[in-house]
């Protein structure tokens, strides 16, 4: 949408929402002890869901006797369900009368819109669910739809934004960095898949993900391939690469140049998480799999172009980020030098663990 048209749209929307405010009176937050059922709406991408895990856990702990349901993207339901402590997860594939009927039948006491965006959809879902009280973020007057709207002041990391929403709900302050654990069966399946491709417990693994939600976020795949080849020479790793169907061309470039030991096109979210968990180092763009790697405790080397470095910086113990602006490239991620990325990758290799040792670390982390 062009800037002028966008401005006109929001002005018109503000008038409509202001007129509709009379039909949506503000209601009072139920007493904590009376909250028996909760709906949390988080229908956006993988990275958003992963970074939201501490918030989900905070809601769960504060209302441990309430039935908690999360509405998230359908392909993320297994991951979110296993990591959030929710009693139920509904896979979202689009707004429909059937979905709204299902939500209304649950008679939620509290609906939480965890999405900070100017789009109205998730706020509408919360209100249309019939919940006794709806809370979420204020952005472009969408607070009219909610009973309580939380304003976020200044530039904050995504997890800090959710911490403000948690504070508005009266939840105790919790850690903001997500930690993700996988089951033994999930890790065993990934280990078997790697073994079938000739990857042994003594091997160190470099995981390459050349994708990104927006094409402007993607560093040229050929440079990832050359960096992978350099890493193989420098620290004797084996290389695996994975991407979604929309990034098949990038994955093919990796295959042609780096000759990876294993390639996965379109793995499920849990399969992707398991492969990353067993890897020694993750290399990719600012994307969902990057945040997944951070939550799994895997060292990461990543690029950052148009993404806001304050809001979307990756979290984790061992993190190297190459920002386009640091190389005089403005927002153009393609201008990040290949040599700089390869050097960061070589430095991060000091933290890489062989597959066998990494596997045991994952099992201990999983309890």
Image: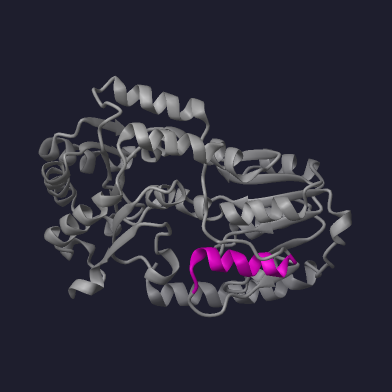
Considering depth in this image, is 145 or 42 the residue closer to the camera? 42
Q: Is 161 colored magenta in this rendering? A: yes
Q: Residue 232 falls in which quadrant of the image?
A: top left
* Residue at image location 43% in from the left, 39% down from the top: 361
Q: Position of residue 27 (x, y in %)?
A: 83, 67
Instruction: Count the labels in the image.
Output: 0
| Residue sitting at x 63%, y 39% | 90
The residue positioned 70% from the left and 66% from the top of the image is 145
Residue 118 appears in view: no
Q: Is residue 272 magenta?
A: no
What are the residue bounds of the magenta stretch?
156-170
Q: In this view, does 133 lie above or below 89?
A: below
Q: Residue 314 in the image: x percent, y percent?
A: 40, 60
Q: Residue furthest top?
A: 196
Dividing the picture into quarters, in which one does residue 168 lie? bottom right
Q: Is residue 266 found left or right of 81 in the rendered image?
A: left
Task: Give the colour scheme of this rendering.
Answer: one colour
> Image check: 363 left or right of 122?
left
- The reply to whether residue 271 is visible in this rendering is yes
Name which quarter of the figure residue 321 lies in: bottom left
Relative to 70, does residue 308 appear above or below in the rendering?
Answer: below
Principal secondary structure, stretch drawn in magenta: helix
What residue appears at the point 80 percent right and 70 percent down from the top-left corner? 26
Report x, y in % for residue 254: 18, 40
Location of the N terminus by quadrant is bottom left
Q: Nearer the viewer, residue 27 or 201?
A: 201
Residue 355 vs residue 292, the one in the foreground: 355
Residue 69 percent across, percent down from the top left: 70, 44
Quadrant, the C terminus? top right
């Amino acid at each position: 949408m062009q800037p002028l048209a966008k401005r006109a749209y929001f002005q018109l929307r503000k008038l409509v929402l202001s007129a509709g405010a009379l039909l949506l009176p503000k209601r009072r937050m139920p007493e904590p002890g009376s909250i028996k059922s909760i709906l949390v709406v988080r229908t956006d991408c993988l990275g958003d869901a992963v970074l939201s895990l501490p918030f989900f856990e905070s809601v769960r702990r504060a209302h441990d006797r309430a039935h908690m349901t999360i509405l998230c993207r359908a392909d993320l339901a297994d991951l979110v369900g296993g990591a959030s402590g929710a009693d139920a997860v509904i896979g979202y594939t689009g707004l429909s009368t059937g979905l709204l009927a299902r939500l209304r039948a649950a008679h939620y006491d509290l609906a939480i819109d965890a999405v900070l965006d100017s789009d109205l959809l998730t706020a509408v879902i919360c209100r249309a669910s019939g919940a006794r009280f709806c809370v979420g973020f204020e952005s472009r007057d969408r607070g009219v739809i909610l009973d309580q709207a939380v304003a976020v002041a200044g530039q904050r990391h995504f997890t800090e934004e959710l911490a403000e929403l948690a504070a508005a709900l009266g939840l105790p302050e919790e850690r903001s960095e997500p930690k993700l654990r996988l089951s033994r069966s999930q890790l065993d399946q990934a280990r078997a898949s790697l073994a079938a491709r000739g990857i042994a417990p003594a091997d160190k693994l470099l995981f390459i993900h050349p994708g990104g939600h927006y094409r402007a976020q993607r560093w040229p795949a050929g440079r990832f391939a050359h960096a992978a080849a350099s890493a193989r020479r420098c620290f004797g790793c084996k290389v695996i690469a994975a991407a979604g169907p929309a990034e098949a061309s990038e994955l093919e470039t990796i295959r042609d140049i780096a000759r990876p030991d294993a390639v996965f096109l379109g793995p499920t979210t849990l399969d992707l998480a398991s492969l990353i968990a067993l890897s020694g180092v993750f290399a990719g763009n600012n994307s969902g799999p990057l945040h997944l790697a951070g939550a799994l405790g895997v060292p990461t080397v990543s690029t950052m172009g148009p993404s806001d470095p304050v809001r979307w910086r990756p979290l984790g113990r061992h993190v190297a980020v190459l920002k386009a602006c640091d190389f005089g490239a403005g927002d153009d991620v393609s201008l990040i030098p290949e040599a700089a990325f390869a050097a960061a990758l070589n430095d991060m290799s000091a933290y890489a663990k062989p597959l066998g040792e990494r596997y045991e670390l994952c099992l201990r982390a999983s309890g």
